[in-house]
Image (spheres, rainbow, N blue to C red):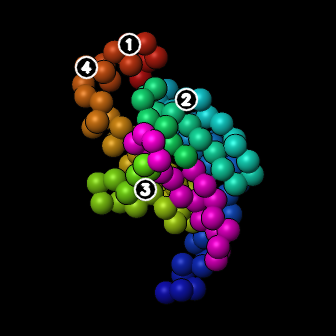
Amino acid sequence: MADEKRSTHEDMTVDDVLALVGELRPAASQMVRTSDLELGFVVYEAFSVRGVYDEYGRGNWGFSISLGGDVWLSRVFGQRLTLCGTRDEVRRALESIDRYAQSRLGSDYLEAYADAYGG
């Protein structure tokens, strides 16, 4: 099983992850490369998200959503947004972030957002 996990791990740069974030358009905006190991973006002009590459072990991406102040959420709907070692795992984390944001914003906001930006 460990060999199976090792063979599916993928090295992804900040630019690789930002490209996956870009698939959320128009939901994702203000995408910023903070460093070679960190990025940030905003979802639906409402939630700030941070992505950080952890070099420990094989290296993985992790994401967290700001709830204000120094509070960051790294698990939504029971799914962790951390330890993402493949493109599919990163994509699933981003989809969970999108689903979380949509559920928090409500239909009126999302309709107004879609009218403004399409989608």
Question: Label 4, on which residue?
Answer: 108
Earlier-in-chain disc, 4 versus 3: 3
Q: Rounded to the nearest whole Å, what is the CA distance between mark 2 and mark 1?
A: 16 Å
Nearer-N-terminus badge (3/1): 3
> Label 3 amino acid?
Ser
Q: Position of residue 80 (x, y in %)?
A: 40, 61
Amino acid found under the numbered disc labelled 1: Asp
Secondary structure at badge 2 equals: strand
Query: Is residue 56 rendered magenta in the image?
Result: yes
Instruction: Specify which label sits upstream in the sequence, 2 or 1.
Output: 2
* Lateral position of residue 28 relative to residue 32, left or right: left
Q: In 3D space, how far apart are the residues under numbered discs 3 and 1 (Cα atoms)? A: 30 Å
Distance of label 3 from label 2 (alpha carbons): 20 Å
Which label lies toward us, 3 or 2?
3
Viewer-nearest residue: 107 or 54: 54
Q: Can you identify the residue that label 1 sits on?
A: 115
Q: Main secondary structure of the magenta part?
A: strand
Instruction: Residue at 44% x, 50% y: name it.
Output: 72
Residue with the mark numbered 2: 29
Say which residue label 3 marks: 74
Q: Which region shows up in magenta?
A: 51-70
